[in-house]
């Protein structure tokens, strides 16, 4: 519970606007709702500046329908994402809550229209074609936040000239997300080319010694490019949230 | 090599200010100097906005003396760090290059004076007393960058009231660095309390199942607080560089 | 074989109530029955105060039918569980032995009726909605033991206010089971909020760096909250058994 | 912060005994003291029923002297432990704060006198002679809590008759702590012999494939004896705290 | 190539019975046949006293048909096994080569009839019902070697009385194979009860922290019972071959 | 971008053949084409002497059709491979681009005709029948490069006489590729028999402790035969490319 | 406790030779003695046919002196080993108990004289010179058992001719112990050359990817030579005990 | 044993130049000598084209003196290396066998004089200053083979311009050895810049998530630059031997 809320409550109590019992009750009346097996957190957007997002895997379509319903019903016009939705989950939840779109492995409602997007330059780059699923999860999440990210695919370090051809795009970005599997070297090279924040996402692309993303993860964490940060394997959503933290709430 | 430099070179050539041979020579005359086994990179500060830093381990005192000499001699008045210096390394290099200070496991020269520091609020928090070595490496590096970080120690999640007592400091920060070993849960809790960027540093503090920092690392990467980013184990220097990337060059 | 039984046998022999051959025979007539590939242990309930439980995976439906039959036929009215039963296993075994119920991934027979439940307060809390399968295995097992556990879902540490809203429930509990995947931090936070026993269950929820529960496992074992104990990944059944050991046989 | 404290504070405010500013101030005046790099938590004993304990490794002797001083000075007559103290740490801190004793790798002050000990039967058993260091850390901690644990050494499963000779001691115990390295099988066997809580501690004893305790840890977590719980490798202190949680505050 | 064969060849050459070219040719005419992608080794039975065995996984049914055909056609009346055969592989190969039997996950031809079996007492014991698949692969292989193994199932260490009820069978065995998953403690306990060779097989039974057999493997390798040996995870076939090496060729 | 290209460009600029804007444009007009999510690298063959190869997994059939189309259309008559193609991918891409062949898990177009093959002796050997899939990926790739590799299967070290029968083939080879799973010992033995380059490929053949190729990988990297090199698990394609690097461009 | 002993006891009781109290007392009077922190097991030699052995690491010299004293004093003339003794341990224990010898990292008392040795041929082979420490621990233990092992050093597989030169020694052995680090391939090759039992010991020799013996361990467990068994890393003592189990008690 | 030798032997026998007994004796008289615990392999140079090399770690100075003596005495004038020699080993062995030099952690005798070196261009590059120890082991070994390698240090990918400044040196090399720790990305970048063979050596440089070289190892094995090969961690010697295999015996 944040300081301001506590102070307001105390004020109410000390001025008689709230009895002790009321006070305890209000402390209980926290800004989330119980929808079965989930406590839906209505004001997270407010508290952390994030759009609502529901992690799909392991939830039944029925649970998703209830959670999405609660969030769409009570949270104004903010965007809402279901990430990593299977086709089955997507079909059921879209039937129950029309108006959403299926994109990049997610289902999204109420994305900000393109003409309202923020002006910061967020570059999302991937080493290979196979990293695109993760890259696009990041891009969709950024769009839900109101950004207009650009996209650069297949610039892995073994073909350095392809990367160098885009060096000005890299150096012009306010933040860069780098998605790479295999040996994950793209994060280090990009980190050396720009002074802007670089959020790297190891992907589970590759086989054998790629160890489902662990190799890229370790490589990114061991990067010789100082100040490169890392999120979990395949976590495009998390990288987008990190960018949103970095660029802060919109100042329009 | 950046775009602008290449374009300038091309201009010089096409206008006759540089012959083809000169052009190739200039491409060779890159902004670093060879001091034995290291290519000292003079203009990294310029290119990436970073103070010079030399990683101590594995270098002989003699190598350090030469590298530090090159950097102090040719790089104006910018700050310079030797990180993870052993006592022996520190003694030899300070004897050869007086004027430095020994702090937080590092040796530093030409730190910006306190009254010139930048105004952004950078909070550096650690879960336990034993994480302080890593925390202080981050703080010293931030000072070399010109920041005036604040420091919050021993606020691990098992004593939640200690952490909650500082909730307003956490929520007021522009960026937070979290250093934690053992189960590394502090990153998740702080990430849930603030919408600002959180850079987490797993530390090798703890024993047995802490696996020398791997447990905290995995926990931070798996954080349920979206958008928390991670750097390598014990890498306080890297976390500070990530903060510098996030806050960008000084705009005073 | 326990001391008391041995002493009784010796008494019988020395008083002539049993011949040496009888004695060896009785030692052989141990309280279990051979039903094909399993030695069904009828008196474990007696010896360890546990309801009968059969681990489903890897057993053929036919094996399950025989084992359940032996246990239902010869063990009075005690409860019986088949854990982690697939739908196929459940269908076959319920057809052969009607009267059971399918719940929480298990099949249960002869659960104690709600009005006979024990009065100790056992709280079962999970960090996320996706941990519910493991949580409910623990709850069902506790009910088979005769407890009336309460259930608290989706109180992960990244939304600390949700957890704090239930702090009195946590502090009132006689024992707490904590199920959490991802970074598993909930165990540490709950361990810091209560002096009661905390049995934590890492779950395989999460992806990438969650490493199918290993991250949560390591984090819980490294908890900075002293005295928190851990059972195996996804082992809700084991956590319930640990609670039963802690609270001991019913004393009504 | 616990519910009761909050309710009391609210009462004070609503009755005018505290102004809003006072209220915030009191929220800040939490029961711990800042002694340099540590927030000493005076009332943890109260809140969690634990004696004070300071983890030695990674702290300078000077830090230890200050923390111990704070704890001895302000916390009545409760017991105090420094665990895993090196000989150097022990010498310095005992010189600064006389009256402590060096035992089982720890330094202890104000242990409860033997004639005041609690009556529950806590059995501490180890598989081999080499596990004794961990076992004794558990025993000393239990004594600090006011227990009078018994001690059973060298009863590893390869010599089953040694273990079976003590079967009545095992079955009479209210709680059992099992310390074992190598293959850690003792926990399973003891768990099968008693219905009481079994807290198992993997130790880093053994070499090669013992993997510094990881083998025993995994074996204990995979135990076929349901309801056996586990703490971290070599964490005798944690096992004792788990026992204290299980047996609860003294009811004399 | 063995010494004796070389010496014989040399004799033939020096006595003129073989020309140099013949000699080289004979060195080439080694006792195996090329059947497409496999070099079928006809005389391994002779050289190592083993029945023929073909590892099923990864081979196409067609490859199996060819290999089995070669082995059945040219190797007298010795037994032949295809291990780990899928149902598809078994169906195809049995259709092509009638007379085999499907048992224990294998297909076997020409098993020695029961009345010709060797008299050594080989005991095959498993900790749980789920280990039976591995146990039975070992038993079938032993039968192919001409042994008459006995079988003891579900004697895991958590129910020590079940194991102790069979202590005389264990102590009467000439060799014991122990199959166990989970914590694999049965190998240590059996190893402590007998002075005979104990070959232990970790099985992939169990879940979570059993790590698909790695936990049992490590535990068996770290056994406190000296002289217990280990083969690979789930390798019942290998354990049987180890027993055959130990008991040597039949001496009837 | 290579030196020569840069020097040529500079020449053009300084002689007026290219304006500064043209120069930058030409730097952008790099030898690859954007076909949706992939930057197809037309001149890699030129730059690195490699045939075009597209890694199949993770790409949609549609992406493959576009990439293959681009490569077939603009790259003269060079060979083209799609590696690790599923049956679905193969069917779709062959329908869209007839003339290719399906072999060894790949799809290949424009393989050099047998009578044009290079004369170096490349030997590809595998330890077992199950390694053949990896071996054949290497062989097909070598054929695309224009080599005429020979093939030696099922010469694992446990039947040393099978291997020794081919010792002259091994010693006559210019380069040897060794594919082996399980314990991967074949690489060491072959490495000891020849002074030629040995490129070893660990395969994921085997089960249990083979750890899906990690055991063979570690064994090959730890080989006591000095100078043996290793590529990633199951990476037959990579091994063939290593051979092509070693033998260099054709000198006919 | 073995069956025979129990039956004898029962006879005594039923015939009046022992009262019930005597019976329980006799059950307690088990064949081991308590010497402080160790239960010295006098009759293990009898029960398992093993010489006494004390594992040195982790024991204080004082503990060793007491344990060795107990064993030498009460166990007739049987051999006694302290394995892995440091120089300090060895010096103290030899001073307290003269007559022992320091060899192969151990201290040994009452080794059987050479002329009394058993006639079975036990071959101990190591891949490299650096494995000799482990090899010699095995050899000394075998000598304590009364064997006369032969010793073959530096026959690693990369120099196959060195190994093949000893093929007759290998094929003549009744049992072979193979010690190898690095890739551990020697076990597979020897296993293919003989039908006798092969006990392999991975050693921690090698660096980097040898992973302190884990690579050799995994390789030996994955051996393509069926029936090769494995003991723990560096466990020469365990391998010798396995051989003693295989060859059984002396039958002279 | 190679084919040619066998054929020669057979010739001698068949022509009466050798009796059968002589033949066996000659087979025994293999080209190595027993110097205590090592079989010194005199003709490996001949057989595999390698200079003699002795791996230092784990050998006593006395063993080294004997092995070096045997090699220097009987092997003509070929070069000899002791790798990874400690200062103590180096001092003792140089005192016993003067004429050697201490360089790059090794001791070397009879290095080919610079003016006799081979003309192939071997480039040895390292990412950082700290990789120099491994790099120099490779360089010294190459010199022992008769090469004249060039050396390029501190060209890690985070400062791409430093690497690109040497692109012509890289592209002119006949073979490249790349030594890199941390994320090991240099191997991929170099592999993309040249079509020549690239042998990469992961180094144990870096801390935390570098995992003592495992991160670089995995990254190099997962390289997106096809055909890059890898040797074990820190194995500069092995990389040089791989180069010698690639370039073959000198053809001057």
Image (cartoon, coloured by chain):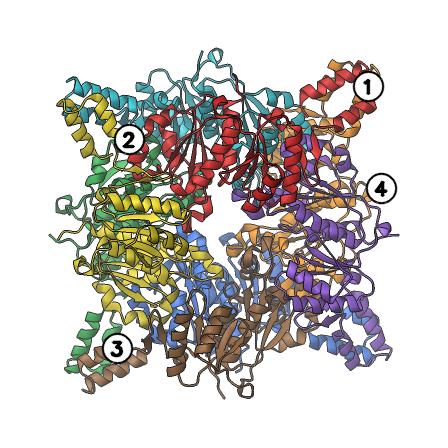
Chain colours: A purple, B orange, C brown, D blue, E yellow, F red, G green, H cyan
Q: Which residue is mark 4?
A: B251
Residue at (27, 26) in percent of width and height:
H33
Disc on res. C27: 3
Q: Which residue is mark 1?
A: B12
Residue B70 visible (yes or no): yes
* Image coords of residue G169 (percent x, y): 21, 37
Circles 2 and 3 on the same chain: no
Q: Dot 1 surroundings within 10 Å: few (below 14), some, or many (20 or more)?
A: some
- Asked if disc 1 and disc 3 are in contact, CB closer than 8 Å, the reply is no
- Spatial CA distance of label 1 from label 4 is 32 Å
* Image coords of residue G198 (percent x, y): 27, 46
Q: Dot 3 surroundings within 10 Å: few (below 14), some, or many (20 or more)?
A: some
* Image coords of residue C12 (percent x, y): 23, 85
Q: Indicate the quadrant containing the N terminus of chain H: top left, top right, bottom left or bottom right.
A: top left
Residue at (21, 21) in percent of width and height:
E20
Is the residue E137 above or below the residue H236 in the image? below
- Spatial CA distance of label 2 from label 3 is 58 Å
Callout 3 secondary element = helix
Circles 1 and 4 on the same chain: yes
Q: Determine the image quadrant of residue G119.
A: top left
- Asked if disc 1 and disc 4 are in contact, CB closer than 8 Å, the reply is no
Label 1 or label 4, whichever lies nearer to me, is: 1
Callout 2 secondary element = helix
Circles 4 and 3 on the same chain: no
Please count the marks in the image.
4
Q: Which residue is mark 2?
A: G162
> Mark 3 belongs to which subunit?
C
């Amino acid at each position: 519970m944040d300081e301001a809320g506590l102070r307001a409550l105390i004020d109410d109590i000390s001025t008689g606007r709230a009895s002790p019992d009321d006070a305890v009750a209000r402390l209980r009346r926290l800004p989330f709702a119980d929808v079965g097996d989930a406590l839906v957190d209505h004001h997270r957007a407010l508290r952390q500046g994030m759009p609502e997002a529901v992690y799909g895997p392991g939830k039944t379509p029925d649970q998703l329908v209830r959670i999405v319903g609660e969030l769409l019903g009570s949270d104004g016009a903010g965007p809402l994402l279901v990430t990593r939705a299977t086709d089955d989950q997507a079909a059921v939840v879209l039937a129950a809550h029309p108006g959403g779109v299926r994109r990049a492995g997610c289902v999204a409602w109420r994305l900000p229209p393109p003409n309202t997007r923020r002006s910061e330059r967020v570059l999302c780059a991937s080493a290979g074609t196979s990293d695109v699923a993760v890259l696009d999860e990041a891009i969709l999440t950024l769009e839900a936040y109101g950004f207009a990210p650009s996209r650069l695919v297949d610039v892995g370090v073994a073909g350095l000239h392809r990367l160098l051809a885009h060096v000005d795009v890299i150096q012009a970005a306010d933040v860069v997300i780098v998605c790479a599997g295999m040996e994950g070297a793209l994060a280090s090279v990009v980190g050396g080319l720009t002074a802007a924040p670089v959020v790297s996402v190891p992907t589970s692309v590759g086989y054998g010694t790629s160890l489902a993303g662990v190799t890229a993860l370790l490589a990114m964490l061991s990067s010789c490019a100082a100040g490169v940060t890392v999120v979990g394997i395949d976590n495009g959503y998390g990288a987008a949230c990190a960018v949103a933290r970095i660029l802060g709430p919109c100042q329009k």
